[in-house]
Image (cartoon, rainbow, N blue to C red):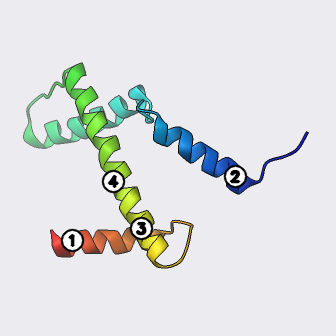
Amino acid sequence: KRRTKPSVAALREIRRYQKTTELLIRRLLFQRICREVTIDIANQAYTPLRIQASALGVLQEYAESLLVRIFTSANLLAIYAKRVTLQGKDMECLRSLLKEWG
């Protein structure tokens, strides 16, 4: 049996994820992170906070959408630098650009 090149396998995986509309972050993991953040906020405000399940779903949709846009923009910076691999300096550059331009 022939082995596929890692680059071919990576491109196949990218295409598969681009076609899907399902959420990629596990729901329970996202809920746990949100709970930790809301507990921190509630402790600072001295008020209990509750989040509806539907609100968590909307929040997760938006968070994943935002992450896709961030990584897409950072990937454009890597392509501009004539690289195919996304590096930390691309994310830092994007962050400074976003800070500069609002």
Q: Position of residue 95 (x, y in %)?
A: 30, 69
For label 2, the residue is 8
Horizontal arrangement in the rendering, residue 4 relative to residue 76 (left or right)? right
- Residue at the top extreme? 53
State how far apart marks 4 and 2 are (Cα): 24 Å
Q: How many marks?
A: 4
- The residue under label 1 is 99
Task: Kindly identify which numbered label has been placed on residue 76.
Answer: 3
Give the mark, 4 or 1, whose residue is nearer the N terminus: 4
Q: Quadrant of the C terminus?
A: bottom left
- Characterize the local packing of mark 4: few (<14), some (14-19) or many (20 or more) Cα atoms within 10 angstroms: few
Residue 3 image position (x, y, % from top left) = 84, 46
**Amino acid type indicated by mark 3:** Leu
Q: Amino acid at mark 2?
A: Val
In which quadrant of the rendered view does residue 63 lie?
top left
Residue on which the image places disc 4: 69
The tag earlier along the polypeptide, 2 or 3, is 2
